[in-house]
Image (cartoon, grey):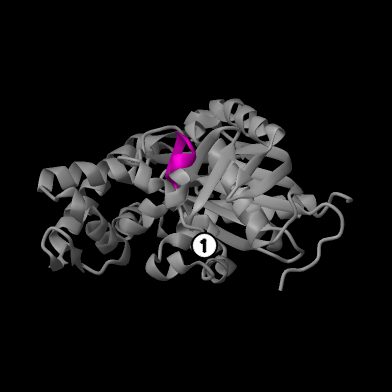
Amino acid sequence: MTQITVGTPTIHLAGDIGASASKFFYRVHPGQAVPLWMDAAVANGLNESALPSIGSKHRPQDSAWLEIGSEIVLVGESAKAFLDNTSLSANKSDKAAYKIAAALGVIAELEQLPSHYKAFVWLPLPLTEIRTREQIAAKFYDICEQGFICRDRQQDVQPILKFFPEGFGLYLNRKKQLEKSSQSIAGRRTLILMMGHRNLSILCFEGGSLRAGRSNSDGPGFWPAFEKATRSAGVPPTDYAGLMSALVTRKSQQISQAQAGLFDFGTYANFVRQTYWQAVSVYLQDNLLGQLTDGTVDIILSGGGAGIIQSEIADYFESLGLSGRLVYADQLQPQLTDVVSQLPEAAQNSSIPLRMSDCYGLFQGLIGKLTKVPT
């Protein structure tokens, strides 16, 4: 049963609008920590002729659309039918405002909110895209100012949008963890490796703040390696989903559309992992090794790519004598697995807690900060 909110309701939302999926955590009522997972696809510039084919019987997050003036925008799963492909190379800023607006509209429907509500939104961006934050904010505020419709429901939002560097949520969580044992993170070097579908980021925090000169977000992503390996091996695009499932679940037997039945993707999966790890290991040699001389360094690993080459990563850091300094981000947040278990996607993809760990840390930071502010 939905609780009654006194006065203007407020959505507290932390989102990670990744290239492979949009990940969110939100709170409307005290004590909530609700995960939300939406496909990354966005199809904008459409007209009303696109709407009849979009059913409203599915979950709102699977069938989301926006009406902004005369423009129709499909967001998430519903957009796939209108796209030839989903680009993992495009900057998040291109479609970010639509994704945030759609998430708010979906949450408002799920929580049965009135059309008018407040929204505090925290959003991480890769270092290479931090410069786009003003562009994202301007478009998002413009959408909210003119008002929009999400799934036939009017949205009148009073937003406050704030940006952070990718990985900051993990840093906040590590800081909180150390404080429990009376340790200060300011005296330690913390390296956060974000192995995403589109890029690999190495973030260096030292002295209590991000060291931009020692950080970068231009490392090899999983998807380019996947495409390179599949093209080289001759895997047809119709079998990409089966191969991806084999990689994520580590179960090589998957349905193959090309083979019209069950097929063992084991050889192809190993080739993708080798291709990806080769690119990652070269990048780590060039950009990470020089920062590992400090004995107090902590290495936090996150992102969907990290789960795919987990054994290779473990062997690598063991060879450096740093196994004891390496930790996977979801291990720092034991409650995260329970929280994301609410998602049907979690039952099919064991790497989802790892992929949502930065967003969850940011959400915890948002809630912790706002609860200190008098209302």
Percent across and percent down for residue 226 are 25, 47
Query: Depth check: 184 or 266 in front?
Result: 266
* Point 69% across, 45% down: residue: 155
* Point 19% across, 55% down: residue: 239
Horizontal side of 70 relative to 240 (left or right) equals: right
Query: Depth check: 206 or 14 in front?
Result: 14
Vertical placement of 38 versus 210: above or below? below
Horizontal side of 44 relative to 175 (left or right) equals: left
Percent across and percent down for residue 344 are 46, 68
- Name the quadrant of the N terminus: bottom right
For residue 42: magenta? yes
Query: Depth check: 204 or 157 in front?
Result: 157
Vertical placement of 58 versus 100: above or below? below
* Point 60% across, 33% down: residue: 69
Q: Amino acid at mark 1?
A: Arg
How many marks can you see? 1
Percent across and percent down for residue 65 are 52, 46
Horizontal side of 357 relative to 49 (left or right) equals: right
Horizontal side of 279 relative to 213 (left or right) equals: left
Residue situated furthest bottom in the rendering: 1
Q: What kind of element bears circle 1?
A: loop
Residue 165 seen by the camera: no
Place residue 34 in its image quadrant.
bottom right
Vertical placement of 176 versus 208: above or below? below
Q: Residues within 10 Å of mark 1 (few under 14, many from 20)?
A: few
* Point 22% across, 58% down: residue: 243
For residue 148: magenta? no
Magenta region: which residues?
40-49
| Label 1 sits on residue | 59
Percent across and percent down for residue 178 are 65, 57
